[in-house]
Structures are given as structure tokens and as C-alpha cells.
Amino acid sequence: MIGTLTPGAPAIEFGDPRLPENFWSKAEVATSGCWEWKNTKVQGGYGRFGVKQVLKMAHRVAYEALIGPIPDGLKVLHNCDNPPCVNPAHLRAGTQAENMQDRLARGRNPAASKTHCKRGHAFTPENTYIEPGRGSRQCRKCRAANGQRRRQRNTSTKAMEGIAA
Ligand SMILES: [Zn+2]
Ligand SMILES: [Zn+2]
């Protein structure tokens, strides 16, 4: 699916005149189909490009020039998971939460291979508990539910204590 445009959308070509020459000279077409930014990498591998003296993220510049304004509060995400890529066909606007989901799903965070616990709660930053010492992830919702069940058992049937713990 990577690299395909929405049917009916005009194909955007590398070197599109809506962006200046010195934008395109800093990027190159990779065999993967990505348009990779070659210089001024910042943290995370994103490219930066100066617009009227202001350095902006290169992929955001590409999105705004070739696709349209970035909706308020949204980030420009890479469908190709390649931060220096400025190919508009690989970019979409999305939320920070989606960005985190993408990262978890793609395993960039090595501790995070699954995006959901076995009961289907999402491992969002808020819902993820890292067990001290072991570093394994636990679902906070499930931890809370387990704790509640344990307390209920303790108060109702003293005799059951310890059996299921
Ligand atoms: Zn790409
Ligand atoms: Zn859970």
C-alpha cells in the first residue's frame, strides 16, 4: 500500500515546482520509493528545511506545499516509517496517539511488540505499566481490575486467601 495515491488524486512528482529548487536538491529518490532528506537531520532522523529563516520539519514543509494545510493539533506521520522521507504519498496527518500506535506496531520501541494486552486494552503510554526490575509491560486497566478482585476476595472469603494469588 505504501506509495499508492488515493485514486483520482493527481500524482505528485519529485521536483514539483510548488517547492523551491533548494528543497529538492536536499532530497533524493530512494529505491524504496521514499524521497529521503539528505542533510540537516534532527533528533529522530527527520529532515529540516528553512522557510523564511525558520527551520521546519522537511516532511511538514512537503505536506503543506503538496497536500494542504496540516489540521490543527495533528502531526504529519510517515506511512513508510522512514523519518527523513518527504514523499507526500507516504505522508498523512494524524494524532500523536496514532504516531505512538504506529511505533509500537512497528516495534521501534523494542520492549513493545504488542499494541494491546490479552484483554484488548491498548498499550497507550497512560495505560502501560513497566514492571520495576523486569522491565516487562503490563496493562494498567488489567492490573487495576486484578487488584480489585483480590481485595474483594480478601474481604468476602478469608479462607480463599492465598489460593488464587
Ligand atoms: Zn517514504
Ligand atoms: Zn488490559
Image: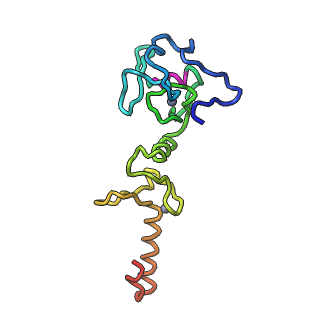
Q: Considering the whole magenta stretch, tell me its main secondary structure.
A: helix
Q: Is 75 displayed left or right of 132 in the figure? A: right
Residue 122 against residue 67 in the figure, above or below: below
Residue drawn where x is 51% and y is 34% of the image: 80
Q: Residue placed farthest to the right in the image?
A: 8
Residue 145 against residue 54 in the figure, above or below: below
Residue drawn where x is 28% and y is 60% of the image: 133
Residue 55 visible, this orientation:
yes
* Residue range (magenta): 58-64
Residue 155 against residue 121 in the figure, above or below: below
Image quarter (top left, top right, bottom left or bottom right) of the C terminus: bottom left
- Give the image location of residue 152, x and y in percent: 46, 78
Image quarter (top left, top right, bottom left or bottom right) of the N terminus: top right
- Give the image location of residue 79, x and y in percent: 53, 35
Q: Residue placed farthest to the front in the image?
A: 31
- Give the image location of residue 26, x and y in percent: 43, 17
Residue drawn where x is 31% and y is 60% of the image: 134
Say whether residue 32 is magenta.
no
